[in-house]
Amino acid sequence: MLEEFEKFLQTHIIKTKSFHPFYNEAYEKMLNAGGKRFRPLLLLNVVKAYNPLLINASMNAALALEMIHTYSLIHDDLPAMDNAPFRRGTPTLHVTYGEAAAILTGDALNTDAFLVLMNSPIDAKTKVKLCEILSFNAGSGGMALGQAIDCYFENQPLDESELEFLHTHKTARLIAAALQMGSVIAGLSNELEEKLYAFGLELGLLFQIQDDIIDAVKSKEEAGKPTNNDAHKNSFVNLFGLTNAILKRDAKVKELKAKAETFGALEGYFQKILDTNFK
């Protein structure tokens, strides 16, 4: 599935005619820098599990998700936010091309994601629903809100409920959106769609706990991005300590493994995610 998605991405990156010396290069750079493609693969595996004939028709939506995620990373790395020098083992865009180019590249990816989504070879009603899901979870009620809270409350410790609110929005909403979008494309019942979305929120929190642990224990080479960088941030490690954050992660893995058993055709995929990403 990953190979199929990569091929689709490479043949569907938007290229713009202009005399700008590096506009297209900057636009493509972080999309081509790799990453796990976790969010698009979530969407595609939901479709594969329940309606595999629609895999090819789902690629646009999967790419739109990856474009939104990539724009968020570009902006997250900006000097006004994390001021990160590299991402996915590659110099960040503001380092290579300047801050203005990085901002505009993120803006373009954010907007173009919906153009890609609306060009999906699926019915209009489904496309409108997918746009609604993606815009809600990435926008003011989702990822953008989480990022705003994260930036504003640096060096101001939050309690556990506030920390979970922050990361539910900043990280988990887009992961949950991937599962919900796959559900809509596959034509699942409202009940199963809601159940998958709720599972995605919990899975997203688990990934954030793991990310905070990685920041505390791995080198920048191992992580592919700067580490030991969260001292001033609201992280699960800072709130609970490393040992307790690991215990919290392990308990959440056990809880989600039990819930994965209720998803039938998706159980094996979810179990594989939990077995390979949280050790």
Image: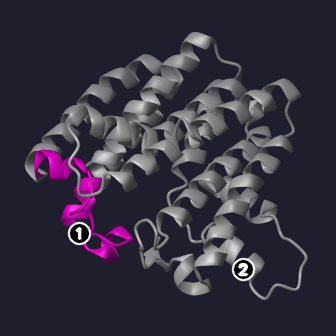
Image location (x, y in percent) of residue 222: 31, 72
Q: Was residue 230 drawn as part of the magenta stretch in this picture? A: yes
Q: What residue sits 68% from the left and 68% below the top?
A: 105
Q: What residue sits 37% from the left and 42% below the top?
A: 167
Task: Give the quadrant of residue 26.
Answer: bottom right
**Whether residue 25 is situated above or below residue 250 in the rendered picture:** below
Distance Cα–Cα, label 2 vs label 1: 30 Å
Q: Residue 25 carries which label?
A: 2
**Whether residue 276 is situated above or below residue 57 in the rendered picture:** below
Q: Residue 154 carries which label?
A: none
Whether residue 217 is visible, yes or no, is yes
Q: What residue sits 47% from the left and 36% below the top?
A: 269
* Start-end of magenta stretch: 212-241
Task: Give the quadrant of residue 270.
Answer: top left
Name the amino acid type tagged 2: Glu
Q: Mark 1 points at which residue?
A: 228
The colour style of the image is one colour
Image location (x, y in percent) of residue 187: 71, 19
The tag earlier along the polypeptide, 2 or 1, is 2
